[in-house]
Image (cartoon, helix red, strand yellow):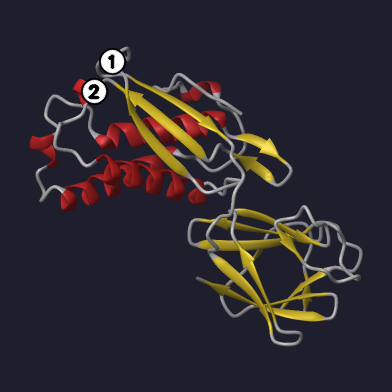
Amino acid sequence: MNTSLCGHLNAAVRHRTRLNPYNHIMRIAREVERRLERLVDGATAAVFRGKMHPVDMADRLMRQADFVAAPGDAGLEIPNRWSIRVNPSDLPPTIDMNDLELELTRAIEEFAAGQAWRNNGPIAVEVVTDGSVPRGLADCAGSIEPGEIEAWAQLISAVPPVVLAVSDNRSIMGRAVEGDIVVAIPELSRRQAIIVRTGQEATIADLSSANGTYVNAERIGNDPHPLVPGDTVTMGDIDFVFRRL
């Protein structure tokens, strides 16, 4: 999936059922600004006067991600590899491009987790300077490049000793080798359950499995069930303890 033309988008044309993203965008933008102030000794206003502020870049990237979020096998998903092209005159000559890209990457990661969007691979943002881009504007493009994502939680079994990594914001578990969390237990369905991260919260839902999924000995259904550290998730005859990282 490739996307282009990043800018201020009209929210009125978006009528998909999901979390309202705009308060989330503003909160993350403020956090980006605070972190950048620490990077430049609190002088962001002076450093970026007359330039494109990184908060504006983060805002445009997040709004573009919201615009292109599309249904996938596990729910809404977005590209994980992003580039944002800006005019070189819009960046102060003293800015550290590595720090800037890391902050923009972090902003998209936090935004995707808050919206419970699947990434399919590690998120990365590249800032490209391009003299053909008009000053004050930015051009964004995103693509999906599958890859290993750092785990945010684990499912731990003592008997047998097994540790399963929960990595994507929407992770399908079951016997299917193409699943996100492969559990090689004959009693499980190919698509047994889905674990979803929404910000700091997590839920699990059964995917109409044959033998069911249990949380703390209670069988759950297709509706999201809260999942907190220490909960016991039972599939087949194995108990897993849920742990946040």
Q: What residue is rendered at 62% in x and 44% in y?
A: 146
- Where 53 sits versus 103, above or below? above
x and y percentages locating residue 105 in the rendered image = 40, 45
Secondary structure, mark 1, is loop
Q: Quadrant of the N terminus?
A: top right
Q: Which mark is residue 131?
A: 1
Q: Residues within 10 Å of mark 2 (few under 14, many from 20)?
A: some
Q: Which mark is residue 88?
A: 2
- Where 208 sits versus 183, above or below? above
- The residue closer to the viewer here, 207 or 53, is 53
Q: What residue is rendered at 49% in x and 45% in y?
A: 123
x and y percentages locating residue 27 in the rendered image = 34, 46
- Where 160 sits versus 36, above or below? below
Q: Is residue 184 left or right of residue 172?
A: right
Q: Which mark is residue 216?
A: none
Secondary structure, mark 2, is helix
Q: CA distance from mark 2 to mark 1?
A: 6 Å
Q: Is residue 99 left or right of residue 140?
A: left
Q: Are marks 2 and 1 in contact (CB under 8 Å)?
A: yes
- The residue closer to the viewer here, 110 or 139, is 139
